[in-house]
Image (cartoon, grey):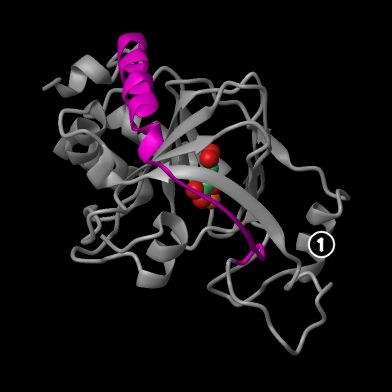
Amino acid sequence: MAQLYDIIDQQNCQLEDDSFITHCRATLDQDGVLTIPGFLKEEAISRLVAEAEAGKPDAFFTSSTHNVYLTPKRDDLADDHVFNRQITSSKGCITTDQVTAESGLHVIYDSPQFRSFLAQIVGEAALHEYADPLSSINVHYAGAGQELGWHFDNSAFAVTLLLQAPEGGGEFQYVRDLRDADGGDMNFSGVEKVLDGRHAPATLEVTPGTLVLFRGRNSMHRVTPTIGERTRILVVLAYNATPGVALSEAARMTFYGRLG
Ligand SMILES: O=C(O)CCC(=O)C(=O)O
Ligand SMILES: [Fe+2]
């Protein structure tokens, strides 16, 4: 099995260097997003792409509609109200248990150094894996025409690793601090401006091997449709601040089509 530093490029990411951690934390706090280009070594990217391609026939492909808040419709609001506007997302996904046991993705995900690094950046005492066998490591596949529509995440932060970029499209776009979930402000007018193209989003520069740490709970984001035959392949590493938490059964059925 590969060692952590066969996979992560220490030149570009010093997991145990206090000044690097401080820099990363300040960037995330200031920008709402942190990118670490060159996080994965080139050889590791090739290996992980080959593994992901091999796992693709097992992926669960879905096309669904949802509102930007990822909640059920409200009957007291009109169908064309921004709260009820339906947005399309379509992608394939494999889960933790479908990632081969020897994969470098498990090495990264399980690494105490990596977890401690992330915990310090996001300001948690520790980070823990999901209690269910599906939700910790996900590999997403977006083929031609597939996209992730505008949404706010339920989780406080997400960690992603782009393995393969498509020929075109597949861009991560976002509008920072568009709502205040904890304050109960859904900002219908602000959301509507983005959906109607009256507020241009920012686009994040991401190349294969880049680590992205994103606070998506209040920042609305999407991934534009893949253009061309090369599949966009992206890994999501998901953690919890408390141990023993499983993703809800409803969410598992929606995302994975099964519970375990
Ligand atoms: O594919 C991406 O880059 C972002 C994924 C995302 O926003 C999500 O899974 O909630
Ligand atoms: Fe998201």
Q: Which residues are magenta?
A: 42-69
Is 168 or 30 nearer to us in this picture?
A: 168
In magenta segment, residue 57: yes
Residue displayed at 31% across by 12% down: 11
Residue 206 horizontal/vertical position (percent): 55, 26
Indicate the quadrant containing the C terminus: top left, top right, bottom left or bottom right: bottom left
Is 43 or 145 nearer to us in this picture?
A: 145
**Residue 105: which quarter of the image?**
top left
By secondary structure, the bulk of the magenta-drawn segment is best described as helix
Q: Is residue 126 left or right of residue 186?
A: left
Is 16 or 63 nearer to us in this picture?
A: 63
In this view, 186 is above or below 24:
below
In magenta segment, residue 50: yes
**Secondary element at image label 1:** helix
Residue 215 seen in render:
no
Residue displayed at 84% across by 72% down: 80
In this view, 169 is above or below 123:
above
Residue displayed at 20% across by 18% down: 5
**Residue 93: which quarter of the image?**
top left
| Residue type for callout 1 | Glu
Indicate the quadrant containing the N terminus: top left, top right, bottom left or bottom right: top left
In this view, 146 is above or below 252:
above
Residue 83 seen in render:
yes
Q: How many marks?
A: 1
Q: Which residue is mark 1?
A: 192
Residue 55 horizontal/vertical position (percent): 34, 32
